[in-house]
Amino acid sequence: MGCAEFGPQLAIFRELSPAEREQLQAHLATCPDCAATLVTYMEQDRFLSALPVLRPSPKLRAAVLARTVDRHRLSRAPAWRWASAALVTLLVFLVVMGGTISVAAEALPGDALYPVKRTVEEVRLTFTFNPAARESYEQLLVMTRLEETQKVLQQGREADVEFQGRLEATTDGGWAVEGVKVQIAPEAWGQTPSQPGAVVMIEGRAAGGQLTARRVSVVPPKPVTPARRVSPSASPQPSPTTVPSEATAVPTPAPSATEQSEPLPTPSLTLDISPARLTRTPRVVPVTVEPTPKPEDKEPTIEPSATADSSESPLPRPWRTRLPRPTVRPTRTPTSAEPYPLPTRTPWVRPTRTPRIPWPTPKPTLTPEASQPTPLPTRTPRVPWRTPKPSPTPGSPEPTRLPSRTPRISWPSPTATPLQNQPAPTSTPAPPTATPERPRPTKTPRPPEPTPTPLIPTPTAVPPTATPVPPTATPVPPTATPQPETTPTCPCGS
Amino acid sequence: MDANKSADLDAAFEQLFNTYQQPILNYLYRLLGDVERAEELTQDVFLKAYRALSGLPADANQRAWLYRIATNTAYDLLRRSRLLQWLPLLEERELPTAEGSPEERTGEQQAVQKALAQLPLDYRAPLILFSVQGYSIKEIGEMLGLSEGAVKTRLCRARERFREVYGEKR
């Protein structure tokens, strides 16, 4: 055999049988070229086997198993597993959605869930096909917007709000819409053609308890708040559910010439009753009032101070009184021929709103110092004159209005005062500031005790501040009361 | 029944993968000279094996069958990417070094890898399988679908060619 025959065996010398190896070794002993070739091949094997060995990365294993075994394991999962997984997912979704919607129902403008609330309302309104139910729901939404606005204003939040309601009053600077004070932004002034009574849509920004309208539009009266006007002849009777004491009387700002220059459109008594309000607070406005209330009854009417306030404020009365329920709007002064008499307890009392009624006119008959100019004690002495209850003088400084009436509070006689046994004059609270302002008839003899007549409650004309005399002014028998000890409470030193 | 068979098949494949993932990866790395490509082709090889495992006879040589899949996959890739375009890339890349300390790295390893890359595919695979992987001629014949004589011939020519290329580099 020659080198050509042993050549292939050199390449696979590892695979040779023992017999072939012996033959090859015999040839290599005589052939140095073939021996060198064998050495070269053995070095090749050594070099090739010494090459670095790679280790498979974990990514390779994960990728292969994910595309083979794991996928098949998932696909072989029983159907009930898929169904249960889908059911659990659905339940979780429903629970989360339900919780979100229920929480969003209480959201206010500016809250994160408020859009959810509005969306739910829109969806519900969309799928309300019954016209009556749809209209009812729309009314509810109108009231909801109004309540949201009121809450936002009460909480002083800052948010964009919108609501619609009846325009109750307009001034140069703002409106009163359903009891909500609205400042009209300058850009919205061109959109304010409404007169009081119209239903308007207000879109604006609430911040710090103030609402500034950016957009104002008039809403067609049909769908919103159909107000029912009742003529005075109708004279609504109070139903059994009437709550007279909670009725709020809102005088129309028109009657007062000092408050509003525009005359009222119609001199009629109107009763605006919103159906939505009636459903929420079923109250009826008391048109007729009992003529003889108890003396200690708190008067729900407008007090004289209210008149002063209304004259100070550029806004009419409705700005300060919220109107949560139907209101009575007397648009003109009722006469004696009207179905209800001049109300003494009704909110609308004409005399009380005219502060210029000269009830504090000079009182020459009662005091010898009639020539002394009488400061108007109509407003200021109201507060301090109530405090000295033990004042024994029931003298009435207002002879023009109540000449024959006793003061509302029956002042006790000096002998009957419990201060007799109280030596400490400081225990009696002294009127702090109002006493020196009032004319002090210190030397005036005590007027004769007026005849006690039945107390006629004319709350509008009888402010309690006008009747009593300062306790220090009345000469009291020294044996009856420790008068010298009580007088030092007067700051003027008399 | 089918579920059990499928589970058995998955178990067999998982065992096959655990056993041969490293040899196949190194074989492909020797053939291609690129680690990333070797890993990608390893994934492809085992995916093909997984799809074809159910049709494999029970008495078949799984190792030879798997190497044949790997060889054919590598051939397909090299044919698609044109070997002439692939070789210059190999020249520019730094070959992975041996494990261990830097002293173990020798220039001969890089020279050997470059010499391998210059061998024709028909010669490269038998030489790697015989010299690096240590398989027999018969097994290599099964892996490559060749007769033992063809394997011997290709192996002899591969050695001669390698000696030429490697001798020139040295």
Image (cartoon, rainbow, N blue to C red):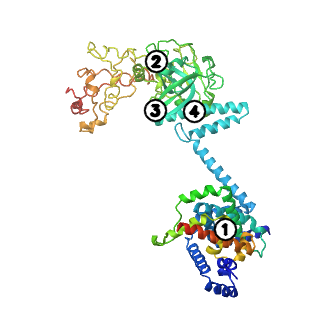
Disc 2 is placed on an element classified as loop
| Distance in Å between CA atoms under marks 1 and 3 | 86 Å
Q: Is residue B166 above or below residue A165?
A: below
Q: Disc 1 marks which residue?
A: B123
Q: Disc 3 marks which residue?
A: A207
Chain of the residue under label 1 = B
The percent coordinates of residue B43 (x first, y second) are 65, 63
The percent coordinates of residue A107 (x first, y second) are 55, 40
Verify CB contact (< 8 Å) between mark 2 and mark 3. Answer: no
Q: Which label lies toward us, 2 or 3?
A: 3
Q: Disc 2 marks which residue?
A: A172
Q: Disc 4 marks which residue?
A: A145
Camera sees residue A356? yes
Verify CB contact (< 8 Å) between mark 4 and mark 2. Answer: no
Using residue A349 as the reference point, say whether residue A221 is left or right of it: right
Amino acid tagged 3: Ala
Disc 3 is placed on an element classified as strand
Amino acid tagged 1: Tyr
| Distance in Å between CA atoms under marks 2 and 3 | 20 Å
Disc 1 is placed on an element classified as helix
